[in-house]
Amino acid sequence: MHSMREIPTMPPTRNYELDLAHIRTQFPILCREVYGNSLVYLDNAASMQKPLKVIKAISDCYSNYYSNIHRGVHLLSTLSTAAYERARKIVQLFINASSMQEIIFTSGTTESINLVASSLGGSTVKAGDEVVITGMEHHSNIVPWQVLCERTGAVLRVVPFNYRGELIIHEYERLLESGRVKLVAFVHTSNALGTINPVKILVEIAHARDIPVLVDGAQAIAHSAVDVRELDCDFYAFSGHKIYGPSGVGVLYGKRALLEAMPPYQVGGDMIKIVTFEKTQYAELPNKFEAGTPNIAGVIGLGVALEWLQNIGIEIIKAHEQTLLEYTTDQLSRVPGLNILGTACEKAPLVAFTMKGIHPHDIGTILDREGIAIRAGHQCAQPTMERYGVPAMARVSFAIYNRHEEIDALVKTLFKIKELFK
Amino acid sequence: MNDLRDLYQEVILDHNKRPRNFRIISQPTHKADGINPLCGDQVSVYLDIREGVIKDIAFQGAGCAISSASASLMTELLKGKDVNEVEYLFNSFHSVVTTDCDCPKGLGKLSVLAGIRDYPSRIKCATLAWHAMRAALERS
């Protein structure tokens, strides 16, 4: 074991242009220390840190032009409305939606999924129908469907996955053959295993049977290009805080025809055309689904985050993060007793693992004292934990600002943990 | 790494590796489960109480070193104790892991868990089995 530790590690060679030092200076939080050590932030799948540009945009909104949107006659409201709708345009272009009307701002992925489950699910799913999800979903893409099924008497069907963490496609096809499936919802990238699912193929299979598809894109959106028209999914949900933007804001993309046919999710102000006590006429898209005053500064911040990311280029980000993923997988394999969970061919930049005889919480606590922030626990995906027969996992996950030196620090501390628990 | 030794002391590492009374009591007079929804840790505590005395106490479950050691140490401490003492010991343990108080008497080896007070996110791990034990007593 000791000799293995002495093997000098070679930093991965880069075949892409990236000024990492410059990128890191744009994240003020990366300068801070944690218990006297430089912060090593490897919990990006839980939430990403924010570049100064986003922080400033939010501050600028509140400092200089903030007001409520879509209703004021005064200058500030006009400015806020313009900035808010500009963000919608940025999102539309970012995911290549056909129109701004297809971009609904929500509080996050969870609300986006709840919106579809409640509105489309509530109006089309009946007793005896079926909703199909996969075994590797985050709780936020399980519970809304479970509740829908309980409410309507429908049945929830689950697509299994193999030990590597890849969906078993023929099982998926078999489930869809029942003729009773009204909706399919699955994760683009698993938050617990890192698996990138073959969205386009899965959508095609569902569409061949006229079944609409929702894709939970929370873990995918920041790591590779997402083109909703190319994927042809009917709904795509993601959160701002997992793509360098603020928390409390997210997006639901939906195909126009479906969104138009769907009843409102929440009702109240800002989503109506005419209200009398006899009858209310709802506003057009996208306002129909944005009842109440939204997270105005958050939406503006999200728009700036997407612009910031585009400025670097998603392909560069992907190249860098995949290099980190490869390096991490190699380095972690050197730690005796460490087991990586989720070894799909196509993986997002995250690695979940367990260590023999050491609970992930203890790993997390000890790494934290060295300044290394990771996720330890059930990853909000308890059925996935059950699949592997573990109560919890440790997970490291990357963003553009991570460096291979940080992975060295991680591995070094993991060896120390082995020593402590031997 | 040094301050971690304050938390992960030998006693804790030992009880984590070889938890005492880690078994099921087949016909317990009292039983309850504890779940920490944050991490999914689970513990079941079994008690056999006769004439007001804890004749036997055991636990089962999956958890981190802190929760396993705490459960193990708790069973060692409580075995043979009068049930009337339990509330006092529960409160003593609770204040040891949550406040800066000096260790109250009667906790024995459990005082090694005092270091957890510097790790607020881990206090629930240390108290999980204790809460399950108290729930078991209240349920009867």
Image (spheres, rainbow, N blue to C red):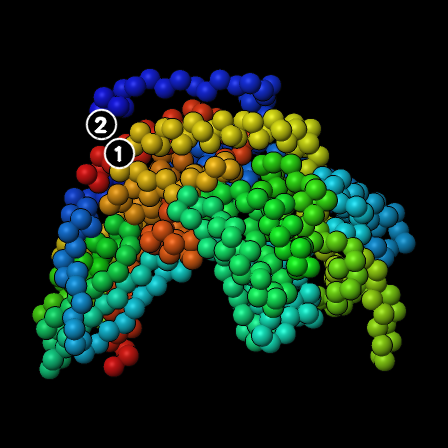
Q: Nearer the viewer, residue B78 or B92?
A: B78
> Where the C terminus of chain A falls, by quadrant?
top left
Three-letter amino acid code of the residue under disc 1: Pro
State the image coordinates of residue A229 (x, y, percent, origin top left): 72, 44
Badge 2 element: loop
Relative to A349, is B130 above or below?
A: below
Q: Nearer the viewer, residue A96 or A200?
A: A200
At a point 41% along the width and 30% down the height, the residue shown is: A328
Q: Which mark is residue A233?
A: none
Left or right side of A8 for A70: right
At a point 28% along the width and 51% down the height, the residue shown is: B64
Marks 2 and 1, how far apart at CA:
8 Å
Three-letter amino acid code of the residue under disc 2: Met
Q: Which mark is residue A336?
A: 1
At a point 14% along the width and 58% down the height, the residue shown is: B20
State the image coordinates of residue A241 (x, y, percent, origin top left): 59, 45
Badge 1 element: loop
State the image coordinates of residue A53 (x, y, percent, origin top left): 67, 33
Q: Earlier in the sequence, mark 2 or mark 1?
A: 2
At a point 43% along the width and 19% down the height, the residue shown is: A11
Kindly identify which residue carries mark 2. A1
Mark 1 neighbour class, 10 Å CA radius: few under 14, some 14 to 19, many 20 or more: some
Answer yes or no: is residue B81 visible: no
